[in-house]
Each structure stands twice: as C-alpha cells, then as structure tokens.
Image: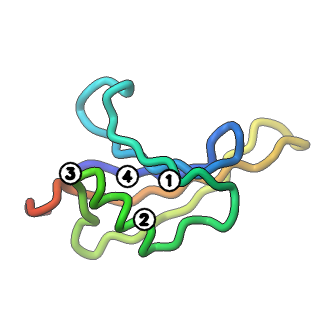
Amino acid sequence: MSSARLGNTFDGTWELYVVTDGPSTDWPEYFFDRMVPVPTPDERVQALAALGFELAANAEWEWQELRNGPMDRVELLAAADVHPAGGTA
C-alpha cells in the first residue's frame, strides 16, 4: 500500500504525488498548475489514474495544516491510501 499526498507547494499551486519505496526524486507526481480552488475529489481520482494508481477501498482524504511560523501562510496537506490501478488493496 502506498500513500498519495496532495499539497499546496511553496508557490501555492497544488501537487499530488504518490509516496513509493523508491527515492523521493522518483515518486510519481501530478501538478494541477493552479492555486485555487482546491482540486476536487474527482480531479484527484483522475490525477491518480494518470499516474497509474487508484484509491484503496474505503480510503478517505485526511487533511492537516502545516505552518512554519505564526505569520506564515498555512500549507495544507491531504493524504489517502492508494494502490496500483487494477491491483488489490
């Protein structure tokens, strides 16, 4: 089982990537090329499919806020369990 992560990058645009066993430079990634709105669940499913993955059974996106300091822009990160498309969870 792998984990998909959706985050707003350092410039505020949205990126989805899948954490795999390989080095982080090899993780599959998809860029939404926009700051707003947050990618919808359907857009995330489509992005995962483009990367060759799908949500695991009963997987839900879990959100957390990341902040470096009290005056910094809040970064959002969502994670969900995924597996290779056509595979079993």
Instruction: Give the SS element for disc 4.
Output: strand
Q: Is mark 1 on a helix, strand or loop?
A: strand
Sooner in the amino-acid sequence: mark 2 or mark 3: 3
Label 2, label 3: how many angstroms apart (C-alpha)? 18 Å
Q: Name the residue under label 4.
A: 4
Q: Which residue is drawn at 27% across and 61% down?
A: 49
Which one is nearer the viewer's eye here, 19 or 34? 34
Residue at the far front: name it: 33
Identified by mark 1, the residue type is Leu
Secondary structure found at label 2: helix
CB of mark 4 within 8 Å of CB of mark 1? yes
Furthest toward the right, the residue is 71
* Residue kind at label 3, given as amino acid type: Met
Q: Where is residue 24 in the image (x, y as percent from the top left)?
A: 37, 27
Residues tagged 4 and 2 counted as in contact (Cβ below 8 A): yes
Q: Mark 1 points at which residue?
A: 6
Q: Residues within 10 Å of mark 4 (few under 14, many from 20)?
A: many
In the figure, residue 82 lies in which quadrant? bottom left
Q: Name the N-terminal-most of marks 1 and 2.
A: 1
Q: Mark 3 points at which residue?
A: 1
CA gap between label 4 and label 2 equals: 10 Å
Residue that label 2 marks: 44
Q: Closest to the observer: 62 or 10?
A: 10
Element type where label 3 sits in the image: loop
Q: Distance between the residues labelled 4 and 3?
A: 10 Å
Residue type indicated by callout 4: Ala
The first of marks 4 and 2 along the sequence is 4
Q: Which mark lies nearer to you, 1 or 2?
A: 2
